[in-house]
Amino acid sequence: MLPAAINAQDPEAKQESAATAQPVPEPTNFRSQHKGTFNGTRLTYTVDAGETYIRNNEGDPTAAIFSFDYVVGSKQNRPVAFIWNGGPGSSSNWLHMGGYGPKRIVVPSDAEHPGAAPYTMKDAPETILDVTDMVFVDPVGTGFSRAIVKGKKEDFWGLTEDAKSMAAFIAEWLTKNNRWNSPVFLLGESFGTTRAAAVAKVLLDDYVINVNGIVFVSQALDYQGSTPYVDDNIISYITYIPTMAATAWYHGKVDNSGDFETFIQQSRDFASQELLPALFQGNLLSSEERARLVSQLQRFTGLSKEYIEQVDLRINAFRFAKELRRDEGVAVGLLDSRYINDERDDVAARPESDAARAISPAYKASLMHYMRNDLGIDWNRKYLNPADPELSGKWRWSPLPEGRSWEPHYVNTAPDLAFVLRSNPMLKVMVGSGYYDLITPFFDAEYTLNRHGIASDDIIYRYYHGGHMMYVHEPARQALLKDTRDFIRSQIGKSN
């Protein structure tokens, strides 16, 4: 069946019509029918790629949020997972085309450069459509999502504003699709995990909605443990050590003849039980203990003793990416430290670019091709990927309303998650982390979620041999999907 385009009008025209008191057009939607086999189950599913209007208290539209809705059948109690990426300022392209969508872009699994078009797309029968419907959401200022009529784009660009708009979208989507009795799951990546924790609390506080489960891909709730560029942030010199150890192991810069998991656990123990107390002591540390720590840091990171002495035991994770293979004239990736890049400046302190971003053109091309040729989206609106160029500069990190005083601190939505977990005893969280992620290190996920009054049995940790987007590595992609499916099934069983 050919996709049907419904009312493909640009939102800027909608704003203009509203200004002249014209009726607001109906949301634009592109519908198509598809079939596929997922985990051995043959399914017929509908894709609604289109807008959902969210409104102010007077009922006037303020934003048109675009989503890609994959819906099987018409069961009103079938689970639905709301899926988004991070940024802030990222569309859902990554999780859609690489992680969880029924079609996927194929890039080299071994961190080789994907080259130029044409790229290969394949069916993704391992995805989770057999256990849940999926809604891939693009926040305002990304993808096709825009502020309209009574809304301004700045109204949605902030930590609190973003969470409220995503929660409003979910509530409106449940109403529009008659799905209020469906189990609800939230699945976010990177800043999308920051968002997911905050959205879960807004849903409970403002809409009286309990979510059934949350999946964090590359957790980022408390930013202290993932901020390595602040010199006096002692925590970051601890949380990144195991990721540096995994990276050094992968690149053969440390003794990797033993067991990987044992080595990583030893790096955890060293970082928290030896290095942390030492950094706390500062200049009171004895010369003998300092020398011992230098040797241990060399053992786990592969860096020279001279370098470790020069940085005063404080290894900046971003500089580590440049230093690890400096003698070869290459830097390792930040998003995925398996990647390497031959940079011009071999004496710079840190990489001039991220080697792992080599996959970006492949992901963009695959989505644009898929939208036009599989989903029938033939629209004159620009798909913002990357985001609106003003978004980053105008983003508000303050959790308080405009005009309220705020002493800046690290962004942290872990207390929101803790509140929701205490309010809903059935709720659990799955945390998927890549060993080679130098943006949101896996030890930081443990450090964050083992605190803030969160019970240990509420968190399920899963680890993958990949980076920030671990699904780039094919074995990790399949493992992530299996773990997510098992998690959803488990949570559904608890609610019955």
Image: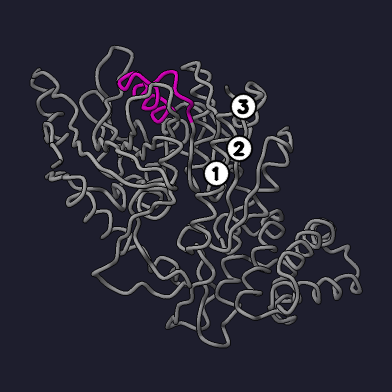
Q: Does the CB distance between marks 2 and 3 fall below 8 Å?
A: no
Residue most extreme to the top: 58
Q: Quadrant of the N terminus?
A: top left
Q: Give the range drawn in magenta.
A: 164-184
Q: Distance between the residues labelled 2 and 1?
A: 7 Å
- Count the marks: 3
Q: Does the CB distance between marks 2 and 1 fall below 8 Å?
A: yes
- Label 2 sits on residue: 429
Tag 3 or tag 2, which sits nearer the N-term? 2
At horizontal 49% and vertical 23% (from top left) the residue drawn is: 203
The amino acid at mark 1 is: Phe
Q: Is residue 54 above or below residue 462?
A: above
SS of the residue under disc 1: strand
Label 1: few (<14), some (14–19) or many (≥20) C-alpha neighbours in 10 Å: many
The secondary structure that most of the magenta stretch takes on is: helix
Q: Quadrant of the C terminus?
A: top right
SS of the residue under disc 3: helix
Q: Quadrant of residue 466?
A: bottom right
Q: How is the image coloured?
A: one colour
| Side (left or right) of 218 relative to 34 | right
- Label 1 sits on residue: 216
Q: In this view, does 421 lie above or below 411?
A: above
Mark nearer the viewer, 1 or 3: 3
Q: Position of residue 21 (x, y in %)?
A: 10, 17
Mark nearer the viewer, 2 or 3: 3
Query: From this viewpoint, is residue 460 visible?
Result: yes
- Label 3 sits on residue: 494
| Front position in the image: 106 or 397 | 106
Q: Quadrant of residue 276?
A: bottom right
